[in-house]
DNA sequence: AATGAATGAGCCTTCATTCAT
DNA sequence: GATGAATGAAGGCTCATTCAT
């Protein structure tokens, strides 16, 4: 039965995402993953060759599922203005990074992405090209549309980073945030509220950057 | 000879910061640290009892040095207005997280902090209380002073997080940022420019949040 | 389709001979054999039950083919004298142990036999009885005929061993011989020349042993 | 106590020689070696880095001890004639390859050498240069002295190989020889008797080769 | 007849730690 | 104060084998 085979492979992929996200690549052991997936250790080797390849498959799965489940135009009207497109972009990013298990299986995987940002694995290279760079370009066009004019890369790229930085920080530092500040448990309500905040904060930031003239633009450098 | 002992202990602490920052706690091995510090493996256990305690000592050292070398009022006039205090705060944070080796020995340790945010070690608990919470409170008062009125925690705390988030993100994701966007090598010029950007962006964000009235304040919830 | 089955089984037997000869029993893996034979791993167990049985089948095949292709009276006139019979015996042995692939498919299998001499496998027991002992007896009668009289086992058996030893050594140690001495690539020309040498050397040896009287015979012990 | 340390390392080296000789490199496990040497598995790694390096050390030890304990001029008068030097050479080789444990610790290591002849390990390269080639050259000069004139490499080198081949074969094929022919247990009496036989057989062979004129010499090729 | 999936055993290695000196 | 030797635990991986199909 292909469904049984697929099931075992899928089970491995599933729990591996969970455990890699929770413990990190090195701390996670294939023994634990195998036990959680209710398969033999050698089955992991059979389906994914080795631990590193399994990790690569998990990474691909996380990004693939994340972007298909929460596209950047999530809940967005076709004729939305750039402000609303930024809002959707930020909300989708929050959901992608922090949606919890009950919603469909990518819980804790936000931390997996956070780990990749800190030290990228070899498998992350492909992810950069296939998912992250196009995503960055989308945000670039949104910001350009909001500003109306091109302020040059020295103003544009940092806007991208500041917006993404906020989204990522809420996800990656969530264990600490919970301890030092507010309730940021990844419930739907919290995510929506924080996304709304980041959106407004970033709109203010973009406006401020646009009106600043003493910041160097590309030409000024 | 106390000087020799102190020297060995200091060498261990020094290279351990480097290597823990570079590889992370689990990936770093005391063998590599011992070899880099030119001491016997057992000497590490002798001076620091075990790997975890060594890590704790490193963490304490990193924060202690970071805050003493780059205080939050760095280069700040005593009578500076809150905007300028925010500027100094952000600049100090950039330097603390990203200052490179030539400047005095805490290179790569920004990544060590980033790792702690993703999964905090037991030793991080003390750091939170001694360094991070007071630091957060300082930023809180700065923002309050900028706003002039207390908008309630639902607006205030996220401002703190969005500002810190930007600073941290630039440091923690630097390997990836370098690949997908701008030159963010931690030179003095780059750090100053990016800190300036984050400062302005955040001023805009704070202003925007202040004027927003539909955002829920604490009482509205 | 019987032809396909037979073909698969034969392919396995064929490449297994090659690979067992090259790597030895333990170092050879059924995975590599299966891939080289272009069959599924399980097909090997299907056709040959397990790795050890496959090895037994290969061993039988090697000896069976070797002795049928290169019989000890190869190229020998029916009325040949014992010296010529020894010559044919030695030449056949060289060919059996070293004939290369182009000649009909038992290349590298000389090393397989060499390995069996060093540590015999369970399957070798049957080979001893069916092939090697009769072959030894044939050489015994040849030597007896050359000597004319029976010098007793203490002189006779070592002659057998010294002759066989030379033949086997040229085959088994060929990787080293090539490195430390002469060109002994198993070309037809080289095999013929070396066999000729061993024949003459052994004739001299036999003659010397025959005339020696101080060597203990069986009775003297 | 250095003697205790040395003792552990020596014990490992000792039993490893035994077990590698008995089972071969792949079949031998460091677990078994560790247990037999009464040390922890990790101790092997500590002293010899890994299995392959341990094997290299064993190989070096076997040859080093073999040649120092049984030099090629063993029991030889300083003014001995070439025939007697050949006799000593052959006797030493028999002892080296087959001397059993009671005599001083290189039992079963003849098989280790035999395995190297069949498939040389990377570590064997150094052994060739340091031990085997000089040994071969010594035998060459002995044969030259016996013949009186240089018959050319096409006659000389095979003489070397035929003599060495006999010695090696008695050692390497001893499990089989025992089954198909005579009592060749490596007792001192047996070794002496067989060495004596090989010596005489080889003297006869050399003489026969010398008088043969139709064999190609170097120039004839 | 033949295969893909899955297993259990076993192997080498690495690591942090301890102990005697 | 500092070290070389030795340990026990655990980890990733490979292999021959089996089972359901």
Image (cartoon, coloured by chain):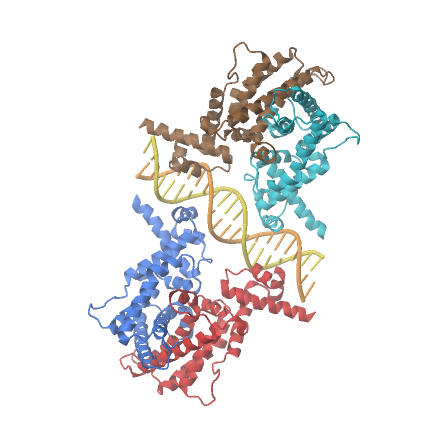
Chain colours: A cyan, B brown, C red, D blue, E orange, F yellow
Residue under the point 51% across and 34% down: B24
Whether residue A178 is situated above or below residue A7 in the rendered picture: above
Image quadrant containing the N terminus of chain B: top left
Relative image position of residue B38 (x, y in whole percent): 38, 36
Residue D177 seen anywhere in this rendered image of the structure: yes
Residue under the point 28% across and 66% down: D72
Q: Nearer the viewer, residue C182 or B59?
A: C182
Whether residue A3 is situated above or below residue C162 in the rendered picture: above
Relative image position of residue A177 (x, y in whole percent): 61, 25
Q: Nearer the viewer, residue B164 or D47?
A: B164
Determine the residue located farthest toward the front in the rendered image. Answer: A219
Relative image position of residue D170 (x, y in whole percent): 37, 70
Residue under the point 44% across and 80% down: C89
User: How many badges with numbers are in the image?
Assistant: 0
Please state if B78 lies on the left or on the right of C172 as rendered.
right
Q: Nearer the viewer, residue C117 or A38?
A: C117
Relative image position of residue D62 (x, y in whole percent): 35, 59
Image quadrant containing the C terminus of chain B: top right
Please state if B75 lies on the left or on the right of A189 as rendered.
left
Residue under the point 69% across and 49% down: A6
């Amino acid at each position: 039965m292909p469904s049984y085979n697929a099931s075992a492979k899928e089970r491995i992929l599933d729990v591996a995402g969970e455990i890699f996200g929770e413990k990190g690549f090195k701390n996670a052991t294939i023994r634990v993953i195998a036990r959680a997936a209710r398969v033999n250790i050698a089955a992991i080797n059979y389906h994914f060759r080795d631990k590193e390849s399994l990790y690569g498959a998990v990474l691909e799965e996380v990004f693939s599922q994340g972007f298909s489940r929460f596209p950047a135009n999530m809940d967005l009207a076709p004729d939305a203005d750039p402000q609303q497109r930024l809002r959707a972009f930020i909300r989708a990013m929050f959901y992608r990074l922090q949606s919890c298990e009950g919603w469909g299986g990518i819980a804790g995987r936000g931390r997996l992405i956070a780990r990749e940002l800190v030290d990228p694995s070899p498998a992350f290279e492909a992810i950069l090209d296939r998912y992250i760079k196009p995503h960055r370009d989308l945000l670039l066009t949104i910001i350009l549309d909001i500003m109306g004019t091109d302020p040059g890369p020295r103003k544009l790229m940092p806007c991208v980073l500041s917006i993404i930085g906020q989204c990522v920080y809420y996800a990656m530092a969530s264990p600490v945030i919970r301890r030092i500040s507010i309730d940021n448990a990844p419930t739907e309500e919290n995510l929506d509220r924080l996304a709304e905040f980041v959106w407004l904060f970033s709109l203010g930031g973009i406006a401020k950057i646009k009106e600043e003239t003493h910041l160097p633009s590309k030409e000024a450098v």
